[in-house]
Image: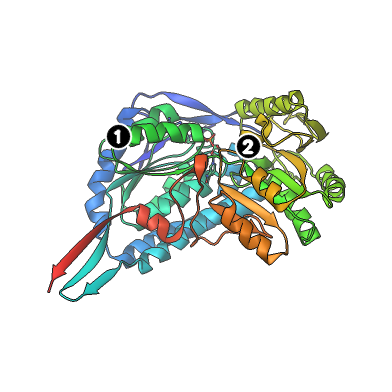
Amino acid sequence: MQIIQNYINGKFIPAQSGATLENINPSIGTPLGTLPDSDIADVEAAYQAAKSAFPTWSAISLEERHDILRGISDGILQNLDKLAEAESMDSGKTLNTARTIDIPRSALNFKFFATALMHFASESHSAPGSVSYTLRQPLGVVGCISPWNLPLYLFTWKIAPALAAGNCVVAKPSEVTPLTAFLLGEICNAAGLPPGVLNIVHGLGPKVGEAIVKHPNIKAISFTGSTRAGAEIARIAGPMFKKTSLELGGKNPNLIFADCDYEKMLETTVRSSFNNQGQICLCGSRIYVESSLYPTFKKDFLERVSKLKVSYPTDPSAHLGAVVSKAHFEKVLGCIELAREEGGQILSGGHAISMPAPYDKGWYIAPTVIEGLDGQCRTNQEEIFGPVVTIQPFDTDAEALELANCTSYGLSATVWTNNLQRTQYLSQHLQAGIVWINTWMLRDLRTPFGGVKHSGVGREGGWEAMRFFTETKNITIGL
Ligand code: NAD
């Protein structure tokens, strides 16, 4: 049994109350171990450690800060196999996904921001009679709260820029997938991160997460998770005038036009639908196809989907593993049931998958394709966050755009066309923070990342993240 502990002031300790939660392995549906059921007292201890560490951490040379963050990146890569196995066991994702996507990207997050801090600069403005310059100072102690779908990947995507900008951090990973965040503590110690600079407090969102958000001296909250929890955080943090970066849910459209590069589109659309069991905020869950291409697309897409193998995470030939938890399994199957009630035809999947022992109690769902629903039904309006997509034809560019924009979400959109003017027009009018043209999930870490409407407020990535984690101060000198 794996006993996870909090990481506070460089030490591994249980919750002060001694309470624990069960951590379940979703591929076999049985406990993997326990994690601390922390509360406000643990958050306070983490805050005090971070506060004490801040004067030194914010004042060390940029080179030294770079070297430590780079050391964490190297440590993640040195532990690639161990971390990938832990991530896969904890979340149900295939070992291959954890090994090739989650863990390498977690290392890259630290490498990227280690170099960013060496180049981060501010502006100066000169005028007759004055010169002004801008300081970008670390905020102090900041909070980072992350979800379960890309556990270490998204946890480090917040922590790395927060530390790079000179802050100390109180962080909370998802209680559903706490294992790799726990292992990160050891890597930080080995890399020479001073005690208290990063503190990791495990536990429930409404208990530990909320205590971080409510803490009067934690200056900013970087949150990735559901729109529901994001709204709750905004409600608390708003009147405290706390800086917030909220990366929330999505219901992303794929717009496929007849003039696209067909084979590349088809291969990518299968991935953008079912990668990580459809549990990526950027997955395209509403697929709109130009009418003239629709019959061909439907036939070929279904054929490709029928070849996807759902299996236990360590099966090297698995395309999909288990979904993350029993609660999520039931939610996704409930969404499929709702689609049926709304008149949708299930063209593929639509059911749970039974696996042989010892995986027979795990939570597996067949990749599901649904046809015959309109844009306004709940299936096409609400986030499912599982291996479920709808397909629907459209006739004109205007109709495609209207369908794409007709939900309350606006995280990303994908467009497949070789028409340059259409590309330009749609890019300008799609209500999304991220638009991909003839590709999907191609990430340059310097670019702004985030959504509009109910998909969030603020941007992560590159200088946007460094600016979020610093306070801007203007100084004007009269000459
Ligand atoms: P969630 O909102 O339930 O939990 C996310 C994190 O917030 C967890 O650590 C949780 O413990 C904590 N939390 C929950 N309630 C809280 C509260 N009241 N106060 C403070 N913290 C709280 O989300 P989830 O189920 O873990 O993740 C899935 C969601 O995340 C989906 O909606 C998905 O679209 C979204 N997501 C968004 C992005 C993005 O970049 N926009 C990326 C990945 C996932």
Asked if residue 368 lies left or right of residue 435, the reply is right
SS class, disc 2: loop
Q: Quadrant of the C terminus?
A: bottom left
Across and down, in percent, residue 120 comes to 35, 66
Q: Amino acid at mark 2?
A: Phe
Relative depth, front residue between 320 and 414: 414
Visible residue check, residue 190: no
Kindly identify the residue that appears in the image at 70 percent across and 47 percent down.
Answer: 399
Asked if labels 2 and 1 touch by Cβ distance under 8 angstroms, the answer is no
Q: Quadrant of the N terminus?
A: top right
SS class, disc 1: loop
On residue 385, the disc is 2
Visible residue check, residue 403: yes
- Residue found farthest to the bottom: 128
What colour scheme was applied to this rendering of the protein?
rainbow
Reply above or below: 444 against 469.
below
Across and down, in percent, residue 172 comes to 42, 38
Q: Which residue is mark 1?
A: 239
Relative depth, front residue between 84 and 50: 50
Mark 1 or 2: in front is: 1
Asked if residue 37 lies left or right of residue 384, the reply is left
Reply above or below: 291 against 26.
below
Kindly identify the residue that appears in the image at 35 percent across and 52 percent down.
Answer: 469
Across and down, in percent, residue 339 comes to 73, 28
Mark 2 Cβ inside 8 Å of ligand 1: yes
Q: Amino acid at mark 1?
A: Pro
Q: What's the distance in space between the residues labelled 1 and 2, CA to CA?
A: 31 Å
Would you call the spot at circle 2 few (<14 residues within 10 Å), some (14-19), or many (20 or more)?
Answer: many
On residue 454, the disc is none
Mark 1 Cβ inside 8 Å of ligand 1: no
